[in-house]
Image (cartoon, grey):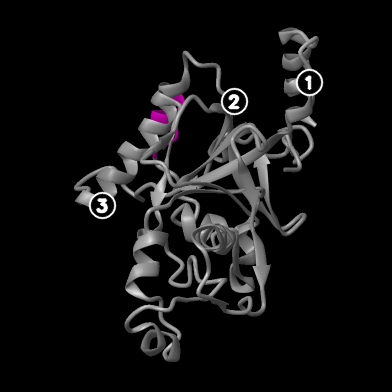
Amino acid sequence: MFIELMKTESLGFQKILDYMRSVLIYMKLYKYKALPYKKDNLNEGELKQVEYCKDIILNNRLFMTPREILNDSLEGMAVPIELGISGSGIYASLGMLHPFVEEKINQYRILSLSANARSPLMWAHYANNYAGVCFEFELDINLNNIHKVSYLDHQFDTLYEPSDDEFYKAIEKSLVFKSKNWSYEEEYRLITKENKQFLDNIKLTGIIIGHKSVWAKNIVNLVKDKNTPIYYTLISTKNYEVNIINKLPTMLDMGVDTLKNIGYFGY
């Protein structure tokens, strides 16, 4: 449709712009990040956690992770590819990626996001068991070429001796399908083959701070001039869920505050 509009000579720029705006699909997506349990005597890895979170807040950008350092050892293997080159049969018999295929897959960078800010598993696995944070972004999934990840019981059939075009399409297909073991992540991802380290100029619309975090005051100070909403997690037996509230849990007015009046936002 858009290509046809572009071909229409009589169509003005404003109409094209209006059309583009009409197909934008904005969605709230979330990035969980770990922070240390403590502030003193931080090791190198913990210092990096702090700096990464500061960078997101101050520079409005997210790191695009190289495929080879993602935490899923099956990443990019949903479509097995067998090439007619030396050693291909040996690697295929073991179900391993041929070094040539792996080299090509490793050219890609990936930004992983989640559709769910209230996942106990995500808070435990990616936000250091509620000591970290969850950043909320509003992104246009069409404009940013963001894909919803699908989850599989089994790999697709092997692709034998593909053309160059088929080869790269198979890689990109593999990068948006994962084992069903990862389905709890409810993942959306941006995939790029460009030498691009960050997704820049993203719209940060909120920060959810884990109730075990010692960094709440630091985060609030970082965003005080940005008017970024701050929320907190609260674990409640009332609904047996991760609740998102607008008040620091240690500041609750016991006997007065309820999940309803402190902002049970129902993410």
Left/right of residue 154 with respect to residue 204 in the rendered view: right
Image quadrant occupied by the N terminus: top right
In the image, is residue 144 above or below residue 131?
above
Q: Could you tell which of marks 2 and 1 lies nearer the N-terminus? A: 1
Residue 106 location in percent, x, y? 37, 59
Residue linked to disc 3: 45
Amino acid under disc 1: Tyr
Amino acid carrying label 3: it is Gly
Which tag, 3 or 1, sits closer to the chain's start? 1
- Residue at 64% x, 65% y: name it: 183
Q: Residues within 10 Å of mark 1 (few under 14, many from 20)?
A: some
Q: Is residue 216 magenta?
A: yes
Determine whether the residue tagged by mark 2 lies in a helix, strand or loop.
Answer: loop
Instruction: Check disc 2: other Cα within 10 Å, few if <14, some if 14-19, many if 20+.
Output: some
| Label 3 to label 1: alpha-carbon separation | 46 Å
Q: In this figure, which residue is indicated by the disc labeled 2?
A: 229
